[in-house]
Image (spheres, coloured by chain):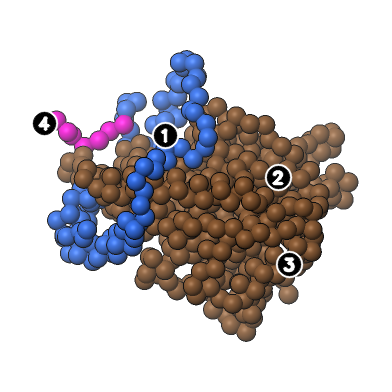
Amino acid sequence: MSLDKATVARIATLARIKVPEADLEALGHELNQILHWVEQLDQVDTTGVEPMTSVAAMTLPLRADRVTDGNRADDILKNAPNGMHGFFTVPKVVE
Amino acid sequence: MSDFTDLTLATARAGLAAKKFSAVELTQAHVTAIEQNRALNAFITETPDKALAMAKASDERLARGEGGVLEGLPIAIKDLFCTKDILTTAASHILDGFNPPYESTITQKLWDAGANCLGKLNLDEFAMGSSNMTSHYGPVINPWTKPGDNRQLVPGGSSGGSAASVAARLALAATGTDTGGSIRQPAGFCGIVGLKPTYGRCSRWGVVAFASSLDQAGPMTRTVEDAAIMLGVMAGHDPKDSTSAPMPVPDFKAALTGDIRGLRVGIPKEYRVDGMPAEIEALWQQGIDWLKDAGATPVEISLPMTKHALPTYYIIAPAEASANLSRYDGVRFGLRVPGASLDEMYENTRAAGFGAEVKRRVLIGAYVLSAGYYDAYYLKAQRLRTLIAKDFEQAFEKCDVILTPTAPSAAFAIGEKMDDPLAMYLNDVFTVPVNLAGLPGMSIPAGLSADGLPLGLQIIGRAFDEETMIRVAGVLESAATFTAKPYSSLAGRA
């Protein structure tokens, strides 16, 4: 599979990274190189092989559904590039 | 007194206990060494005042006859660990100004054991790289150079600042993290010991995530004994990381018995890769002979999936990274670049905040996870991962540890391999399979190349059997007697 410019632009949108139109072709070339290289995995027959979902031989533990932390709005907002009145702010989404 | 900086964790701790010197003296010597060697660019943030204040508190505890395992010992932290109220960057522009309101579990354990924080170490951006060239804060310089050749070399990566600072005697030890070789390869390139524990041995809580199913933190030190001591402090179950193993922490130092008689050492035939320099092949053979002389039995093993490990890794790691890095959106912390809409603000922020390699991996990750390609790439890679882990399982029926080279070359020059991402990825050919299988691995400085650069050997252990790995590492270390130090004209040194 080879990525064309439109596909690169679509992935960039999915990843929310602005890529200038002029860079799409070169970037596509780089990504194609990597993708063609990983496609060597197609040589391996993996019929009937379970995909690994956890490398550790353990089941994830459950914990009690209790609040263990909280009331730290100031801590959490301290690093916000733009916070106001105890909230994060973002550009207007609803007109 | 620069002798202070040549101590190990063990000898420095003993010196403090015997009141031969104070923690403040010991720490001041390192603070001075850091100031004199800023050209290495090993640190992103230096915290000398904090280190000295912590040392003073250590001296008070020591005077009262108290003190933890690492009491009074100055160490440095890869800038991927969140440290409360200390700038934490992951070497990325996108985390500009981020001062975490919390401390990572591992660094908290280190401070609780009495260690002092010298500062935060440079790395590849988000730990993505094998040369430390992708850092927003510029490359780290390897303190080693080839004798008679003053070209600057890379320290390896991603824990390049960690390896360079420990090799250059700027810190007694450092933390690293290893997703595909990021502790072991730079340890090899800088002539120090680097230990990646079993997945789940150390808590990942508060460590900036790259690929969560592969990431594991570990110690970077100048001796095997120090690695064992520091791992003992770092390891242990943490309820805040659901993948940390609820297992007791053994006395890793006690594993250093020096007795490996009867142990079976696996030598994987698939690791004799094309184009590997003859001197690395020779060092590997030397390592086999050393272990044989100590009473171990080398056995040939086969890991047939080895050649598929790198491409598997370069699907799984970017996929997880693209998910993990979605949190950097200009809203809650770090850089924000304005845009007309919310989406445009995200896109502008991430375009300006991520470097080229991080963008490449996030885009590859987004692609292999996207509708229509998920099965062909991501699911395929997960199936391969099962086969790679099974290779090791079968191999460990025939052997107790595995011995390999750490990397297929010695440190290369700054700027080399930069135009070809794939050539850079090949650095990790011997280390990546270990992460995919979740096993512990360790690099030991074993010798010098013909050019006078350090070369490492890797020991791979069974899951949660760091002890046998450490025992073998101790024997290799004794046999190799690696005493060489960096040649570069480190300030304040001959």
Mark 2: which amino acid? Glu
Residue B468 visible here? yes
Is residue B223 rendered to the left or right of residue B327? right
Using the numbered discs, state the Cα–Cα distance from disc 3 to disc 2 in whole angstroms.
21 Å
Q: Position of residue B379 (x, y in %)?
A: 33, 44
Q: Quadrant of the C terminus of chain B?
A: bottom right
Mark 4 or 2, closer to the camera: 2
Disc 4 or 1, which lies upstream in sequence? 1
Using the numbered discs, state the Cα–Cα distance from disc 3 to disc 4 in whole angstroms.
74 Å
Say if mark 3 contacts mark 4, CB within 8 Å: no
- Chain under callout 1: A
Say if mark 1 contacts mark 3, CB within 8 Å: no
SS at mark 4?
loop
- Chain under callout 3: B
Disc 3 or 2, which lies upstream in sequence? 3
User: Which chain is blue in the picture?
Assistant: A
- Chain under callout 4: A
Q: Give neighbour class at mark 1: few <14, some 14-19, many 20+ (Cα, 10 Å).
A: some
Mark 2 or 1, closer to the camera: 2
Q: Nearer the viewer, residue B402 or B455?
A: B402
Q: Report the disc number at residue A78.
A: 1
Q: Position of residue B362 (x, y in %)?
A: 32, 51
Q: Residue at x 17, y 44 (%)?
A: B340
Q: Position of residue B154 (x, y in %)?
A: 52, 68
Mark 4: which amino acid? Glu
Name the chief secondary structure element in magenta: loop
Q: Which residue position holds label 3?
A: B289
Q: Give neighbour class at mark 3: few <14, some 14-19, many 20+ (Cα, 10 Å).
A: some
Rendered hue of chain B is: brown
Mark 1: which amino acid? Lys
Q: Which residue position holds label 2?
A: B467
Q: Which residue position holds label 4?
A: A95
